Image: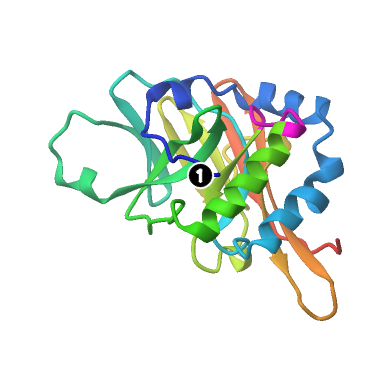
Amino acid sequence: MTVPVLPYHVEHYNSLPELGVAKDQFEAARVSEILFTEIGMAFVKHHVESILGIILLHNHFLLEPDEMLVNISSTAVPWDMRSNAKELSNVGASAWRFTEKGVAPYEFTHGASEVPLDKVAMQLFLEELGALLLSKNLTHVLGVCALGKNSFDKPSTMEFTSGRANITLPFDISPDDGNVIDAMWQFSSNFSGFTTGAGQNRQGKQDRNAIRHSSHSQHVSL
């Protein structure tokens, strides 16, 4: 069964909850009980754990109808899709959510490597993960995101939202204090026997105007 990759629409992003609401949904659904078992094993089974991670669906701020959120280096800002700027030709999807009609991109990155979601191997993964999330009523809670090269070994980072910009900083440079919220996870496999490792990223929220994100990696046995 094919999982269509849908064209972008601003409502794919704007309909996402704020981070605090997303956290409450995550906890109410008791996602942590299957995160490093059923969900993590789907990534490892299809050998996509170095390409994709799983993300807590949330927005940073609302976009206008003709805007898309684009990550440029350490900053994510709205871009006007009506612009003729040549930079728009080098923008690729980097986060997707499952819908009734397929997978929909909702966040983008300038200069991103293309993730071939339409390829057979990736389609098999999306079909299995989508069915799992649907069976657990989690398609409104979790999505998938592209991972950069060697992302598992990169140092921790955090993000905060200021106005209509989302800024990434090293974890030890914080503009404010805040509670930590897990919001993105990546998995790693260790094929010495049947041990599988999982990597976890964290994010946090201070208030409605500032979101602090941190990330770290940890290995667990599944």
Q: Indicate the secondary structure of the residue bearing disc 1.
A: loop
Q: Nearer the viewer, residue 120 or 56?
A: 120
Rendering coords of residue 145 (x, y %) = 54, 47
Rendering coords of residue 87 (x, y %) = 21, 47
List the residue tagged with mark 1.
2
Q: Which residue lies furthest to the bottom in this view?
A: 192
Magenta span contains residue 137: yes
Rendering coords of residue 23 (x, y %) = 72, 29
The amino acid beneath tag 1 is: Thr
Residue 173 seen by the camera: no
| Residue plotted at (84% across, 71% down) | 195
Residue 43 seen by the camera: yes
For mark 1, does the 10 Å Cα neighbourhood hold few (<14), some (14 to 19), or many (20 or more) residues?
A: few
Q: Give the range drawn in magenta.
A: 135-141
> Seen in the image, is 34 located left or right of residue 17?
right
Rendered position, 188 above or below 72 = below
Residue 139: quadrant of the picture: top right
Rendering coords of residue 142 (x, y %) = 65, 36
> Seen in the image, is 75 located left or right of residue 81?
right
Q: In which quarter of the image is the C terminus?
A: bottom right
Residue 78: quadrant of the picture: top left
| Residue plotted at (82% across, 52% down) | 37
Q: Which residue lies furthest to the front in this view?
A: 1
Rendered position, 181 above or below 21 = below
Rendered position, 183 above or below 189 = above
Q: In which quarter of the image is the N terminus?
A: top right
Q: Which of 213 and 176 is in front in this view?
A: 213
Magenta span contains residue 103: no
| Residue plotted at (50% across, 35% down) | 102
> Seen in the image, is 178 located left or right of residue 94?
right
